[in-house]
Image: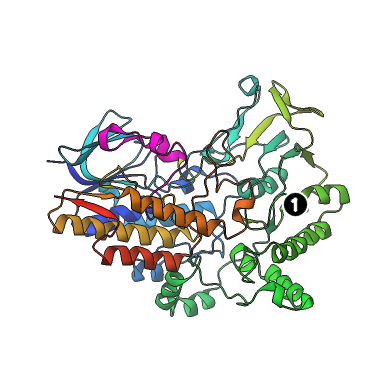
Amino acid sequence: MADLDVVVAGAGFAGIYAVHALRSAGLSVRAFEAGSGVGGTWFWNCYPGARCDVESKDYSYSFSPELEQEWSWSERYPAQPEVLRYLNHVADRFGLWPDIQLGTRVTAAVWDGERAEWLVQTDDGQQRTARFFVSAVGCLSAHQVPALPGLQTFAGPWYHTGQWPKEGADFAGRRVGLIGTGSTGIQVAPEIAAVAGHLYVFQRTANFAVPNRNKPVDPDWEHAFKAGYREYRQHARESFLGVPIAGTGRPALAEPPAQVQANLAQKWRDGGGMPFLGAYTDVLVDRAANDIVAEFMRDRIRETVADPDVAELLCPRAFPVGAKRLCQSDDYFAMFNRPNVTLVDIRSAPIDSVWPGGLRTRAGDYELDALVFATGFDAMSGALNRIDIRGVGGEPLTEKWAAGPRAYLGVAAAGFPNMFIVTGPGSPSVLSNMVVSIEQHVEWIRECIGYVLAGGYCAVEAKPSAEDAWMGHVTEVAYSTLFPLADSWYIGANIPGKPRVFTPYLGGVGPYRARCDAVASADYEGFVLSS
């Protein structure tokens, strides 16, 4: 008999809610978390300037009306420390700590077909058996550092934003090199520039960014908003992104050009990435409409950056706006007007190597005291692939996913019975409000497990045919948009040698939820239930 009903890997937003939801259903559950605290990506990514790009009223749990009423956010877009305080509060409030083991990484999970259970191993030498294994390791938790020749010889400290030291890093008066200009690089750069002697931003790909317009939460607004929170949450569940957005509902190409510019200007003043991209219905599916928005954004860069040559280097041209994650910052572009900030174009003169005193490009040497890598993650599949997961017949998950990650509904992989993936490949995940998607997945998994146990089944497994059909649908939807035109981490382009497969589901949070509910209502159509 298994030690536990469920083992959960990870204790971020997904793992915390999985523990609560599964335990509330009467299941014995244990979550193993590698960090010394809960929070997942919000525990590790404690770099200066770390901030959520979804508004706090949306980036929070909806499962408890009492929780959402009693917790007050201080800002429109919450900073990392506040998100972490919130998650610790949730663990405290619902008494989850006894079922979360910190400082313990899941290293292996092997399916035992004869006993119909998972054997889970952790890095402290423990072995636990469980009827079900739930991955809550997250989409953005396997950080990656580029293989730069000579990095090990660098005389100064170097950091990755996804593994930032809890004691912080002292850049006062130092010459700092920043590699990576995606969402994280754009957040951390102004913070470093404010204290560094000099900041060199090594840019391979220019990125689009909209202003946050971050501000404190007004208590009167909060009181009025919370009066309708339940209705708002339902709208979020039924929406396309997991966030209700007031767009025009019209295509930009059908609007008079002057009106388009006026609407974009208003969205720019309001701030926020989701509302900006959602202003018109054709921005992410029609290149001509996308070009209108992209040029509007390039004009804002030109207005902000004093040096015309620097401004043009900062103007993105290699991909449609929104096809890579749209960054948010109120001060990134203005930062380049500081005398202690230099933009280094490594598209035309790539990085050659690191030497003890700094970094060498094909155009010259840069003397540095510290290096910061904002180079992201092996997204979607990296964290799971770092666990030795073996399914039916001992098949490694890494072999199954050798041509790219895949899962039926993004929640279950064929050949891996009784294993569920929260916000896995083939689900809205990173192209949605993650908290809404996490809650939907955890609740669906809870109900599926309940169905298996109530029916006297020993295992539930996705059919290969259902998985194939679903991933074909995911691909078809993706290629009806502009997203695949970018070399993004959505398709694994940031990891050398990784198969390029577009894995997030772009069909919308509401329609996806309806599809998952329909599968469950049809006695888990597409799954094999074994007695």
| Residue 463 locus on image (x, y percent) | 30, 50
From the top left corner, tell me how far across and down residue 415 is, in percent: 30, 42
| Between 284 and 72, the one nearer to me in the picture | 284
Which range of residues does the magenta coloring cover?
382-411
Q: Which residue is mark 1?
A: 317
Q: Is residue 472 above or below residue 2?
A: below
Secondary structure beneath label 1: loop
Q: Residue at x 33, y 48 (%)?
A: 464
Which colour assignment does the render follow? rainbow
Residue 35 seen anywhere in this rendered image of the structure: no
Q: Which quadrant: the N terminus?
A: top left
Res 326 → quadrant = bottom right
Residue 398 relative to residue 250: left or right:
left
Residue at left 34%, top 51%?
465
Seen at 78% across and 58% down, the residue is 298
**Does residue 409 appear left or right of residue 281 in this picture?**
left
Q: Is residue 407 magenta?
A: yes
Under mark 1, the amino acid is Arg
| Residue 461 x/y as whole percent | 26, 49
Q: Is residue 251 depicted above or below 399 in this figure?
A: below
Between 377 and 158, the residue placed more toward the observer is 377
Depth order, front residue of 497/341: 497
